[in-house]
Amino acid sequence: MSFSKRQFAIGLASVALFAASSGAFAQSSLDNIMKSKTIKIAIPSDYPPYGSVDRNMKTQGLDIEMAELIAAKMGVKVELVPVTSANRIPYLQTRKADLVISTLGKNAEREKVIDFSSAYAPFFQAVFAAKNVPIKTFADMAGKTVAVTRGAMEDQELNKVAPANVDYRRFEDNNATIAAYVAGQTQTIATSVSVAGDMIAKNPKLSAEYKLLLKDSPCFVGIAKGDPALKNKVNEIIANAKKDGTLDAMSKKWLGRPAGDLPV
């Protein structure tokens, strides 16, 4: 065998050995969780209503309940790992977390580096108003004032479906939009569920609630590449929670609307 062929054979064997060892490591993730009786789940802590810290410094929110549900169904203890949008995927890749449950949307770029479960919750832009404001269809918005951030997705989506005589009050950023609605300058507000969740938490006297859906972008659980056993287990838990109504109940509690049909 020539030197080049010998080197090629050695290199090929090394690659195969590395692949086998990596596969064994990945496949053992679920086993390791079950053996240690602990699962580390990355969650948001500053993004209500999905994850935030209450007055007693306890983390709460839809993503927190989902993390606790998965741990409970697996029969293990959950270790919540606060993350930001910027570091949640790196935490998964470096095994600082076994799963990411942090309003994670799925797209082609992310699918190159991590895997995704079935969707467990909606993330959406919507119209919100006080409970005593009767809005059941977009036609009911006729003649009403609405606070919206200029050029934002909710501004664009509302233009597609709202009556022509809706009175738009456009502002340059989310803070100004929220401030206008909170001050009573408009009857309704069109914004994302996360922005609305923070507004509602800080201003409970507004009695604001979800009224109409503008656009939906579901949340998925992030899983490290090559973890089929763990992915299957998470999907099994999500499927059962969807079937027995748990996902709808969680979504209703935190987002003001059922989870509805979610992609698998």
Image: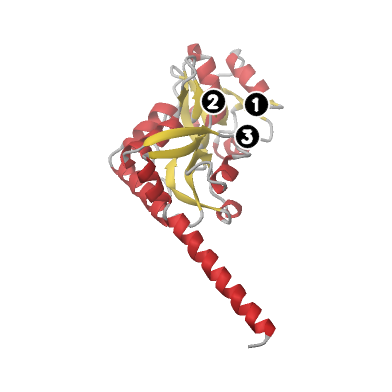
* Front in this rendered view, residue 149 or 165: 149
* SS class, disc 2: helix
Write the residue at 27% across / 40% down. Answer: 244
**CA gap, disc 1 and disc 2:** 10 Å
Residue 109: percent from left, percent from top: 61, 53
Task: Point out the tag, 2 or 3, that comes first from the N-terminus.
Answer: 3
Count neighbours of disc 1 (C-alpha within 10 A) and say few if under 14, some if 14 to 19, many if 20 or more.
Answer: some
Corner quadrant of residue 248: top left
Q: CA distance from mark 1 to mark 3?
A: 12 Å
Spot the residue most to the right.
172
Amino acid at circle 2:
Ala
Which-is-in-front pick, marks 1 and 3?
Answer: 1
- The reply, left or right, for residue 254 in relation to residue 214 is left
Label located before the other in sequence (1 or 2) = 1
Q: Picture coordinates of residue 188 (x, y %)?
A: 55, 22
Residue behind mark 1? 174
Q: Which residue is mark 3?
A: 155
- Residue 82 pos. (x, y %): 54, 32
Q: Which residue is located at x 48 percent, y 57 percent?
A: 226
* Amino acid identity at mark 3: Asp
